[in-house]
Amino acid sequence: MNYTVLDFFCLMASICLFLYGMKVMSEGLQKVAGDRLRNILAIMTRNRVTGVLTGILITALIQSSSASTVMVVSFVNAGLMTLQQAMAVIFGANVGTTFTTWIISAFSFEFNLSDYSLVLLAVGVPMLFLKRSTFKSLGEFMIGFSLLFMGLDMISEYVPNLQENPEMLRFVTDWTTMGLWSVLIFFFMGLVFTMIAQSSAATFALTLIMCSQGWISFSLGCAIILGGNIGTTITPILASLSGNIAAKRTAMGHLLFNVLGSIIVLCIFHPFMEMVADITKACTGTSPLDISAAQEAGMRGTTLLDEKGGYTARAQSCVAFGLAMFPTVFNACNLLVMIWFTKLYVRIVCWMVPARHKDEEEEFSLKYIGRGLMSASELNILQAQKEIQQYGKRVERMLGMCKDLIHMKESDDNYMHTYNRIEKYEQISDRMEIEIGTYLNKIAEGRLSPEGKMRITGMLRIISEIESIADGCLKIAKTLERKNKNHVQFTDSVLHEIDQMFEIVSRAMTNMLNVLDEMENPERSKIIEAYNKEREINNLRNSLRDGNIFNINNKEYGYKEGIFFMDLIGEAEKLGDYMLNVIEGVKHQFRTAPVSPAV
């Protein structure tokens, strides 16, 4: 087969299209999903059994375990699923993918995903021109989804097409008489083929051709399929490269699940293969191992081999059934064992793919608020209080990132990484506000004392103000981005004054978190300190504003530098206002005696 340089570049472009589709789909998903899709997925995956069934159903419908696993990776990357939920879906996806092998075995037919992609593209593009932002985001999601499938289809198209040129593989007959080494050789052959073709179904079809032609035995065909079970994990691994740590853990979980299962089966390969052959014989009346034995013995002119030594229609049907049964039994056994150790499995994956810093987990999940049925509303208030404390600590990290960003240059390696993390944290902050607010509203629907109702009102105000702090941090990051685009550089004296302001704001934030930690009984001195810090921030803002005008008039720095300087100071001052509002929310929540700002 003539494989040109142009074909190679088309292959690279196909991979780029796949990765871009993954990115667009994930971004559109985050915009359109909101809280609804998260709740739906939470219901579908609320326990291991329903999660597994979801994975089986989705994979059977879209005919690709790679594509369904890629979707799971994007859901985790968008914060719509937890790692534990994703693992259950992936376990099910490995069983669901055997549905494709049965279709190929029975009808020698595969669905063309690109046909569905074009339909999605035809629907998604016009939605970009609608007025409602929800429809635009949905259109963006559908476009990304279609590009992802088109990329997968084009990758298969531009790799060396082994299915159309099976004669290229006649040399493999020389490697079929080496015992255990033959099994390992064909195992790695299946792994490599699947990684190249990006489809375990393609590997299965190729294996079916080689077995039906009599080039390799049934046992070596099973070895190829077993290797393809690991090779198919390359697609979600590629999809996770541009994702967060949760997405990378999901892809690693998929890889580890398939590798562990394959290694175990390799250790008991011949007994396991004989079990599959017995199941096939019970269903079809013929064992595929008997066909291989008849071929080795040269028994031509039988019901299994024709006069030329080729497989008869009955033999081909039996081999096809056995090859489809092998991954079904393998994945079902793997699932039945692994499903009981999901939590342990998740801990192992987290250990294998640790966060860069201990407190910098980027996976969005609520720590104290569960999704099950709520018991006593008064007790649930305590859970909400703990979650609010975690919410405040997460936003505090955003403020620390902003302080670091001020001293970074656009050319620094960590600049864009820090900026992107601030954006990601702000998106997580939005979802946390919605989740906690929805939870508080559900608590309010129950029987509450008047004090309990006051607490709910105060906490709703608190989460709104904390989210405003997160918005303010993002505005600071965007101000710094505009500064860099305008090629503005601050002098050392200006940076020192900015640091002064952010140092006071940081102390105000620390005090606010201390009050949240003592929400049940906040110290009066800390509430008084909050008012003093806010007043100190206002006084410094006024002083710096007057000094800024003086410095501009005296040509200490230019007018543009002065504008960006005061924009940062103004945003920092607003953060102090939001922090004071949080303190007042705590006062309102527990009817703390009024503390005058003049104290």
Image (cartoon, rainbow, N blue to C red):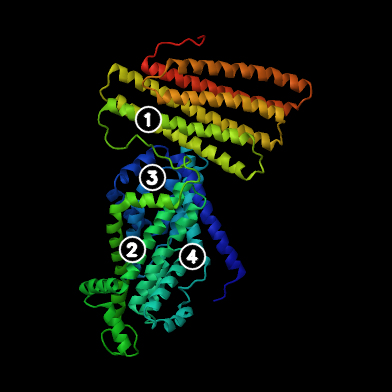
CA distance for labels 1 and 2 = 45 Å
Q: Amino acid at mark 4?
A: Ser
Quarter-of-image position of residue 365: top left
Q: Residue at x 70, y 35 (%)?
A: 486
Residue highlighted by disc 3: 82
Residue 156: image tag: 4
Ranked by sequence position, the earlier of labels 1 and 2 is 2
Residue 96: mark in rendering: none
Measuring 34% from the left and 53% from the top, which residue is drawn there?
Answer: 55
Amino acid type assigned to the residue bearing label 3 in the image: Thr
How many angstroms separate mark 4 from mark 2 (CA)? 19 Å
- Contact (CB < 8 A) between labels 4 and 2? no
Marks 4 and 3 in Cβ contact (< 8 Å): no
Spatial CA distance of label 4 from label 3 is 31 Å
Q: Residue at x 50, y 22 (%)?
A: 578
- Give the residue type that dot 1 points to: Lys
